[in-house]
Image (tube, rainbow, N blue to C red):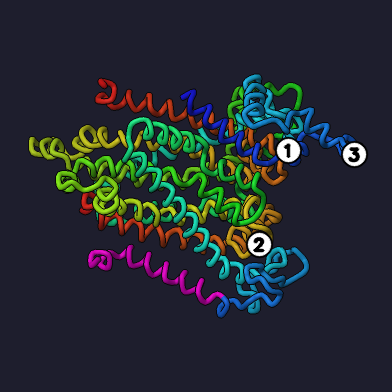
Amino acid sequence: MPLILIGVTLIIFSMIWALGPDRLLASYVKSPEALKTPDAAERLIKKYGLDQPMPVQYIKWLGNILQGDFGYSMVGKKGVLPSILERFPYTLELALYAVVPVILVAIWLGVVSAVHQNKFIDQFIRVFALVGWSLPDFVFGLLLLWVFYSVLGWFPPGIVNTQFDLVMRSADWKTITSMPTIDALLNGRIDVFVDALRHMFLPVITLAYLWWAYLLRITRSSMLEVLRKDYIRTARAKGVPENLVIKKHAKKNAMIPVLTVAGGSVIGLLGGTVFVETIFSRVGMGRFLAEAATLLDYWSIIGGALFFSLIMVLGNLIVDVSYALVDPRIRLE
Amino acid sequence: MKKFWTNGTAVLGTCLLMFFIVVAVFAPQIAGTNEMGDNYQIPRAAWSSRPIAPTAEHPFGVIGGRDVFYGVVWGTRTAFRLGLIITGFAALIGVIVGSISAYFGGWVDEILMRIVDIFLSIPFLVAAMVMTTILGKGLDKVIIALITFGWMSTARLIRGNILQAREEQYVMAAKALGQKDWIIILKHILPNTIFPVVVQMSMRIGSYVITAAGLSFLGVGAEPGYADWGTILSYSRNWMTMLDQSWFAIVFPGTAMVLFVLAWNLVGDALRDIFDPRMRS
């Protein structure tokens, strides 16, 4: 794992390095005044060591990263790391709300679909999954925003209404987790909680729908494969009721591949926040990246990419561990 | 192949695909050309950036001064170009890396697979965003970025398949006959392992097109005014709070995207069902 993290930093660094000294310099200089004297550019390139060979620059940059210095963020108007940490709870909250429906509903529908293979309900679920799988998340998000906000006015974009935003900024609001819904409950403000949930509804659906479709397909095919196994035939032959065969014998075994993919999908959800947060104008990591990309705020993008990669690596590690917990065969090895 | 045509979804997918091919080929006849020169630039239909609802002259409406119909029709060409180029190159790199990895084994395999792991550790969309931002605007940059971060799954797939095929009897037989290793790979192993790659490719074309459109939507992909589905969508970002006035700029390119991806997914699904006997019911 440390090897992978080093590799990731190397890839990301080589991308900034490819910018060349001149363009990199632009991200250090905060006002045009600094470049007034004729040889200022060369002097500054020397000063920041931008003309040094790549390995030297890489080591220096890595040293800064390890000390928590990710550079200055134009989007956050402060350091990159504090800007990211300030936004991350919002994204995490969104992802957590999306994960639960994704996993539960997808597994349930997948099992139903497999058990009734080729019947009407199976065909229906498959069409639902196929459409979901083919629907780009940003198109789906825009459609939802159009119908449920512009036309019907039910679910507004943003985090909370303006009046509650003032409440959250006021002095007696205690910020504990920085996640609006949880903080609202901890502050005992049910009205703020309900409003935050209302703002969360469309983004959660947008994030969840695509992965529903994906997980559902995996569950279905995994179930179909298990249902053909000898031990299922044995169970049926010895007279175990069908619903018990499915619940106890088939579902448990079919869940193993699903779990690996589910872990991956949780991580994949975080990538989807780039679109969802942009469309529903929510504060968070995803929108931070999108804004940084449009403003050519290199250090913010690099910082964001590193942060997302770190989550991905850690997430995969957790998936591997839980995989071993679920499947006794892996544990024994 | 007979099985393919008796499968309803496969036929639907093929028809959709044919439809898109026809639209792409006859784009000049369907939507006209740009008198100012470059056909991939959507001609200006209005000078105000306000959205104009569909009329007889502009059946899909106008947004940002650009005719949506023209953009959607010519965008079909862009979609095919993006999808085929990215998928082709990504698969080629994947097949080469995967074959080398499986053929040499040992430390070569170890190093290549660690590189694959490393590339897979940066979320695809984020990696593509970072790279296009750094390379600059333009579809060619998007293509480079998506190829750079799109080859890994093919490499893994082909490596696994080759390792599995190596144990098969026909390979043993070829070896026993004294065939050279590279001939065995080219003549015996690759033809028997390439099919899953073709299935995977057909399913990924759609997702690459979507990712490219997504980058354009965020404003880091194609340049404004370029005939690309994502670019048209990105115009509606300026009207986000009143989408009821610019719905056509979402619905039409959005539908095109969904159907395009659906077509490839259906075809890929059907191909997999045919060539993976275990999935047959």
Element under disc 3:
loop
Pointer 2 and pointer 3 on the same chain: no
Whether B18 is drawn above or below B186: the answer is below
Q: Predominant secondary structure in magenta? A: helix
Label 2 resides on the chain identified as: B
- Residue B203 visible: yes
Q: Which dot, 2 or 3, sits closer to the camera?
A: 3
Task: Locate residue A50: give its quadrant.
Answer: top right
Element under disc 2:
loop
Label 2, label 1: how far apart the Cα atoms are = 43 Å
Closer to us: A105 or A261: A261
Residue type for callout 1: Pro
Q: Which dot, 2 or 1, sits closer to the camera?
A: 1
Label 3 resides on the chain identified as: A
Mark 2 in CB contact with mark 1 (< 8 angstroms): no
Task: Locate residue A91: give its quadrant.
Answer: top right
Mark 3 = which residue? A38
- Residue B255 visible: no
Residue type for callout 3: Pro
Highlighted magenta segment, given as a residue range: B1-27
Residue B246: numbered disc: 2
Residue type for callout 2: Ser
Mark 1 = which residue? A21
Closer to us: B14 or B145: B145
The number of discs equals 3
Label 1, label 3: how far apart the Cα atoms are = 17 Å
Residue B143 position, x and y percent, is: 55, 53
Residue B55 position, x and y percent, is: 65, 75
Q: Which residue is drawn at 45% across and 46% down?
A: B151
Residue B252 within the magenta-colored segment of the rendering: no
Residue B18 within the magenta-colored segment of the rendering: yes
Residue A147 position, x and y percent, is: 58, 56
